[in-house]
Image (spheres, rainbow, N blue to C red):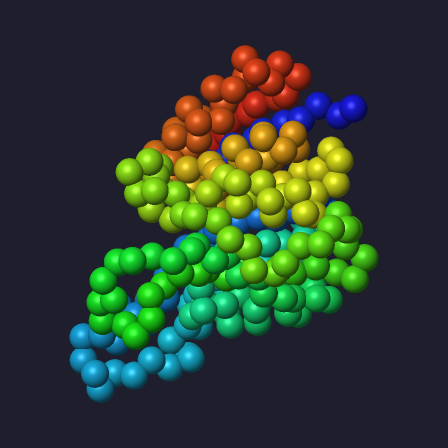
Amino acid sequence: MNKNFYRLICGDCLKVLPTLPDESIDLILTDPPFYLPIRNYASRDKKWRPKIADTSIVKNFFETVFREYRRVLKRSGHLLCFCDPVSYPIFFHSSYNQFHIVRCLVWYKGKNYFPLGKGAWRHSFELILHAQDHNATFKKENRQDVIEFKVVPNKVRLHPAEKPVKLLETLINAVIPENGVVLDSFLGSGSVMEASQNMNVSCIGIDNDSDYCEIVKKRCFGRTFLDHEAEYNYEVFK
């Protein structure tokens, strides 16, 4: 049985990803910042309508990231990437040329009863882009492409976009092989690493915010007394 490892890298994923070996990862499970700059200034004056060209900076960034994802991911592996309806087309375009199959999963957060506000619909879901090749492996179970889990309550969040660990465990369990390795290139407060620990698989986490890396160290590296056989490593990438 291989020894699990948990590697935390504080650095820019565009610089760190190229240092990872080819086809070394079984699952990329990540929640990148999918904020689009056009939203910021388009709201100032109604005459400035959004244009698809406005997304070019974000698109170029993620095309570079997704090329690295394809390189480091095993041919039997999977990419699961959180996004929203606005950013999904950019992620889809970035992954479509890299993988044989690209599909959409829905994380349904359940009903909320906050005031409606300015919109016509209450926000109750996020999307998860799922990309794979034809020979990708997964556990054959009767699972649905709409997955329901409650959000992490605000009062206990360590990150504003923190995902529930049980949701992440469900995603990992569906596709990870024994002795598999998970990569999260936008680790945030470390939910994916914690879920990987709970599922007894290795994890590499990258984040360029040193404050969040400290949170991850306290959250995940403090388990060394429980995981005597696991290796823990923290690196600052410059």
Q: In the image, 179: left or right of 163?
A: right
Q: Is residue 226 visible?
A: yes
Who's the residue at 30% across and 74% down the image? 120
Q: In the image, 105: left or right of 51?
A: right
Q: Residue 84, position in %: x, y?
A: 44, 64
Quadrant hosting residue 95:
bottom right
Quadrant hosting residue 42:
bottom left
Give above or below for 113 relative to 118. Answer: above
Who's the residue at 73% across and 33% down the image? 179
Q: Is residue 76 visible?
A: no
Q: Looking at this view, is 31 or 214 the one in front?
A: 31
Q: Residue 135, position in %: x, y?
A: 81, 57
**The N terminus lies in quadrant:** top right
Q: In the image, 131: left or right of 59?
A: right
Give above or below for 237 relative to 171. Answer: above
Give the tally of numbered discs: 0
Give above or below for 52 relative to 169. Answer: below
Who's the residue at 70% across and 43% down the image? 176
Q: Residue 70, position in %: x, y?
A: 67, 56
Query: Residue pushed farthest left?
Result: 44
Q: Residue 94, position in %: x, y?
A: 57, 67
Who's the residue at 71% across and 23% down the image? 3
Q: Looking at this view, is 16 or 166 the one in front?
A: 166
Give above or below for 66 relative to 54. Answer: above
Query: Residue pushed farthest bottom?
Result: 47
